[in-house]
Image (cartoon, helix red, strand yellow):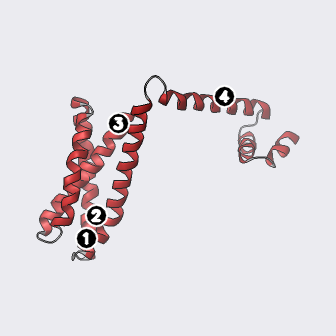
Amino acid sequence: LQTLEKMERGSPGDVLLVTLARLEPCEAGQLARHTDLAADEASAAAAALVADGRAVVTLLLWFSFVASLAGHYFLTGWLPTVLSDSGLTISQANIAGGLFNVGGAVGSLAVGLLLDRTGIKVVVLAFLLATPVVISLGIISGPSLMLLMLVVTVAGGLVLGGQIGLNALSG
């Protein structure tokens, strides 16, 4: 008990150990040894990501995730605002934002099914096709509401489908 009280005044990691020790009573030293082993295993797993020629693939995968999530964030967060500023009603702009996510659900299923058959090619194709489709959103926002809604749905399918494909590839 004195060891636990001493650890409570230490680092945040020590405070966590104290909390765990109170939840699962055991010898504090034994708990610390388990924690050290887990930290060693985590270090070994992190080192394995860049060992044996995996560094380039790991970095490319990380870059792809960051770029994909940034694109998803900006489209989901800003699409309704940009569309309402370009003349759509707030209701229409919010419907378009919802259709982006509906397209994402359908695209995720489609990319998942095709990924099993064709491999990484479908993820690359989804992102390559997503680029001109997303760019066209700024051009189409005026002429036709139905065409705009269709393009937003397709953009969601390609952007979010590609993102889900990245998740599958990293596993």
Of 128 and 111, the residue lying toward us = 128
Residue 118, image quadrant: top left
> Mark 4 or mark 1, which is nearer to you?
1
Tell me which numbered mark, 4 or 3, is placed earlier along the sequence: 4
Residue 155 vs 53, above or below: the answer is: below
Provide the secondary structure element on which disc 1 rests: helix
Q: Earlier in the sequence, mark 4 or mark 1?
A: 4
Amino acid at the residue labelled 3: Ala
Contact flag, marks 1 and 2 (Cβ < 8 Å): yes
Q: Amino acid at mark 2?
A: Gly
For the point 27% across and 46% down, the residue is: 161
Q: Residues within 10 Å of mark 3 (few under 14, many from 20)?
A: some
Mark 4: few/some/many CA within 10 Å (<14, 14-19, 20+): few
Q: Is residue 154 above or below residue 96?
A: above
Q: Which residue is mark 1?
A: 83
- Secondary structure state at the residue bearing disc 2: helix
Q: Is residue 158 above or below residue 49?
A: below
Compute the Cα span from label 4 to label 3: 29 Å
Q: CA distance from mark 1 to mark 3?
A: 32 Å
**Disc ID at residue 37:** 4
Q: Is residue 1 left or right of residue 100?
A: right
Q: Which residue is mark 3?
A: 168
